[in-house]
Image (spheres, coloured by chain):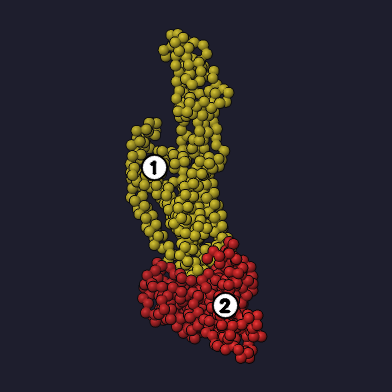
Chain colours: A yellow, B red
Amino acid sequence: MKGKTTMLRSVNPSAEAGPVGRARSTALGAILLTWRQVRAQVLLAFGLLALVAIVAIITGPHLVHLYDVNVAPCQSHNDCSSASSAFLLNDHFLQATLNTLVLVAPALTGMFWGAPLISRELETGTYRLVWTQSLTRGRWLAVKIGLVGLASMAVSGLLSLIVTWWSSPFDRVNLNRFTPAMFGERGLTPIGYAAFAFAFGVAAGVLIRRAVPTMAATLAAVVAARLAIGYLVRPHLVAPIRSTMPFPAGGAGPTAVPGGWTLSQQTINAAGHVIGQNGGIGSNGGFGFQQNSNGTLVLQGVGTCPGKPPVQLARSPHPGFLQACVKHFGLRDVLTYQPASRYWAFQWYETAIFLALALALAGFSFWWVRRRLT
Amino acid sequence: MTVALETQGLSKRYGRRWALRSCTLTVPPGRVAGLVGPNGAGKSTLLQLAVGLLRPTAGTVAVLGGPPAHDPEQLARIGYVAQDTPVYAALSIREHLRLGAWLNPRWDNEMAERRIAQLGLDPGQRAGKLSGGQRAQLALTLALAKRPDLLILDEPVASLDPLARREFLQHLMEAVAEREMSVVLSSHLVADLERVCDYLIVLAAAHVQVTGEVENLLASHRRLTGPRCDPARLPAGQDVIEASHTDRQSSLIVRGEGPVHDPAWTVGQLSLEDVVLAYMSRAGRAQNASRPGLEVLR
């Protein structure tokens, strides 16, 4: 009711609106104008979102059912590999599509909503029309950034919510949501990415002043930011856990951290040098012994075992002898990882980082539009 | 009433180029002031400084007694039609009027709709499909419906054909007659301004050359023709704006209040265009003189 009164005031020339009423009415006007400018694209986006939600609601419960029937029971008798791989083949196309959607949604809203938001006004000259109406350009910018920025975050946030829910049976089997490939496609982080992409698009737009180059710059920035956070920042957000284990005689083999994120698995010798990866020797993680013609045994890539294996056991060496050999070289298996329990902390940290970047970029846009774009 | 537009040493520099230099002028209230000058003289810069789209590099500018675009109140009192009359191509005429109503507390919707109807425009038409003349009329409607105390128009008729030009200026004059407001209007053609302006500012080479009431400018400027004379021996009390000499004859354009008694001179009246052109060519000569070598290059 209050809003309606204000609206009437703004179109009724005889009404005497006070300064507060006027400011409110033009702010509402800026909201209406912004909505008019973006409504087609926003409605399209939310229409697609509704479509995704419908597909998820139709197919999701069935996936939960399949999980409960096929995967959950096998866990009690500890052999799930065949049941799991069969389960993972369900709705394979839909899995790929939804993951891709969450991956690209922030970049798309950044490119198509953030980048042209100001640059198109500057490019077509309409800024000269709108900045000479009865509201300051700061207020105009605040409304545009607030409204369209929130819409961008809502699209990616809701999409992530739907996909996180729909994929949860798969994620429980894969236990890979903490890995670099999946981390940005679940949970809160898409909201942060969307805010950043949008704010970057706006800020680049006030500098570049042309819509299409701004869109290209925004795409490049989003890709660069995602790669940078994934490879340079995220591994160090919290110091990873380092666990050192004695090397088993048969080779350690790659060790998975269920639901966690393995940063590295290295084989270290007595001198502290890294001599292998993934629970083996060398970069491909192989492990094996070879017998010389003189009867001695060689741990491949490391050296000759001390002493001779008992003759009768030369063809299939005694485990105790191999164990002693590995021990002789002082081999250790060192695993560096982020445990599953840190997943949500990482989600919050990364989202907060991108929201902070978005705020800084928005602040820059304000400063530039109000002080420098003259 | 407060002074419509007042500048004090107003200057604007883009990079290394001065678009406007030490511009000091006053436009009294209630006038229709013409801002005339060649292309690139700084007209658009001056007007954009006046509406707050630009900020001065040096000097001050005040519109209706206050700094431009300082607050919503100030913005509401000034109507502006930008060069090339930008509008939102995807929005219809009706939506532009709605936009005006949303963003302007003093909006006169009845007048805006009446004007669009009088112009014979279809309110459902997208602004991107309008002709240049129609777009200019839409932009003028948006500016007028704000019910401004000062209307600033930046080359509103530059891209229009002669008929649309006359129609636009006619509508502008009708609006000025209907409602008391000051107008500042720029053009590079004196003919456009002659019909509508009662005050004139000549801007050339980034400097103000002359300002004043059109009537006074016409009264104080005369053409003197006579036998070829030494440029140093000119009638007293007269300021020579332009002098041209043939073998036998000298022709001067002078500014002065007193009568010319020397019988050697024949005194002739000048059109507004003559006066403006005299100042523009003087500015052009001064600019070339300060940049030796330019003539050679030509």
- On the image, numbered disc 1 is attached to which residue? A169
**Residue A212 seen by the camera:** yes
| x and y percentages locating residue A179 in the rendered image | 46, 40
| x and y percentages locating residue B9 in the rendered image | 64, 72
Q: Looking at numbered disc 2 in the image, what kind of residue is underneath it?
A: Tyr
**Around disc 1, counting alpha carbons within 10 Å, would you say few (fewer than 14), some (14 to 19), or many (20 or more)?**
many
- On the image, numbered disc 2 is attached to which residue? B279
Q: As rendered, which of B84 and A140 lies closer to the eye? A: B84
Q: Secondary structure at mark 2?
A: helix
Tell whether A294 sits left or right of B12. left
| x and y percentages locating residue A164 in the rendered image | 42, 47
Q: Are marks 2 and 1 on the same chain?
A: no
Give above or below for A36 relative to A81: below
Give above or below for B124 relative to B182: above
Q: As rendered, which of B226 and A29 lies closer to the eye? A: B226
Q: As rendered, which of A352 and B50 lies closer to the eye? A: B50
**Residue A134 seen by the camera:** no
Q: Looking at numbered disc 1 in the image, what kind of residue is underneath it?
A: Pro
